[in-house]
Amino acid sequence: MGLDIDENKTMTYLTQTAPITLSTLTQYKQKGEKFSCLTCYDASFAHAMQLADIDTILIGDSLGMVVQGQSSTLPVGVHDMVYHTQNVVRGNSHALILCDLPFMSYATLSDAIASAKAVMQAGANVVKIEGGSELAPMVSVLANNGVPTCVHLGLTPQSVNVFGGYKVQGKTDAQADKLMKDCTAVVNAGASLLLLECVPASLAKAVTERFAVPVIGIGAGVDCDGQVLVMHDMIGVYTRKPAKFVKDFLTDDSNQTKDIVGAFKAYHRAVKQRAFPTEKHSFL
Ligand code: KIV
């Protein structure tokens, strides 16, 4: 998509590439083409992502940490997700829009329905929920009501107090077996996407090969169908020590870019060309 500033100083869209849909991502998977995903929370960065052709955007509850300055994602509410989703969709008409349902907003089926309704009506295309096989009935009800789900497994930040910190998950055979069973249950229930965070690369590869639905990775090795990073991390805006799977695409000299759109383009290109992530960004 191209964009220009006209004489009246209003932004006008010149050309527009087709919006990315779930079927686009499935076709990418079938063709072996990788896809890019970044978190985003406002219209200006969403627009910069459109200029860089980013395939999918996640309005992540990470906004609690990177936008609100909270120490975890737990304080984020549905109203926050609605507000940021409305802002993002005003700035981007290309990417598939994923939106997190925040902590405890899908503790019951009726909560999940109300929360999903709010973020879908704000402009999301897919809702992301954290958990495993216990989510299967919810995934099924949402799918039957026109709400596609992305199920986030592995390190699920809303359970940080259960895990006792942000740690790699699925390292033992028993944990890996459970994760595979969880994926099977939610895929059979109708999940449209899986997202794996901080799991060994070999486990993420096995999940990606086992299921027809696209699998997005973060700290999950080189073999997932799509890759996501928190936007602030990949432009070097850190409030804490960056994780092993993070790469700063703004100041990395090899990209020869010094602006934000250039950094987003470099990330998109690196994902498509399988230059990011590498083993250096993976847990083995
Ligand atoms: O909230 C978020 O940004 C996320 C990503 C880390 C995947 O869930």
Image: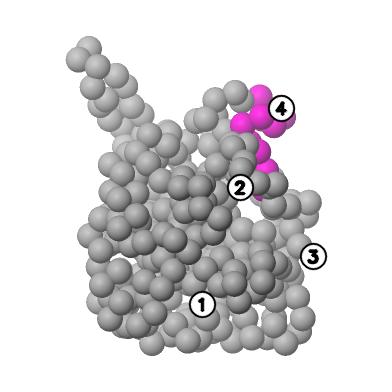
- The spot of residue 153 in percent (x, y) is 56, 72
Q: Quadrant of residue 124?
A: bottom left
| Callouts 3 and 1 close, C-beta under 8 Å | no
Mark closer to the observer (2, 1):
1
- The spot of residue 78 in percent (x, y) is 33, 62
In the rendered structure, the answer to whether residue 53 lies left or right of residue 144 reads right
Name the residue carrying label 3.
Answer: 284
- Classify 10 Å Cα crowding around label 1: few (below 14), some (14-19), many (20 and above): many
Name the residue carrying label 1.
Answer: 131
Residue 17 visible in the shown view? no
Name the residue carrying label 4.
Answer: 253
Q: Is mark 1 within 8 Å of ligand 1?
A: no
Mark closer to the observer (4, 1):
1
Indicate which disc, 4 or 2, sits on the residue closer to the N terminus: 4
| Callouts 4 and 3 close, C-beta under 8 Å | no
Q: CA distance from mark 4 to mark 3?
A: 27 Å
Give the number of the disc on residue 89: none
- Classify 10 Å Cα crowding around label 3: few (below 14), some (14-19), many (20 and above): few
- Classify 10 Å Cα crowding around label 4: few (below 14), some (14-19), many (20 and above): few
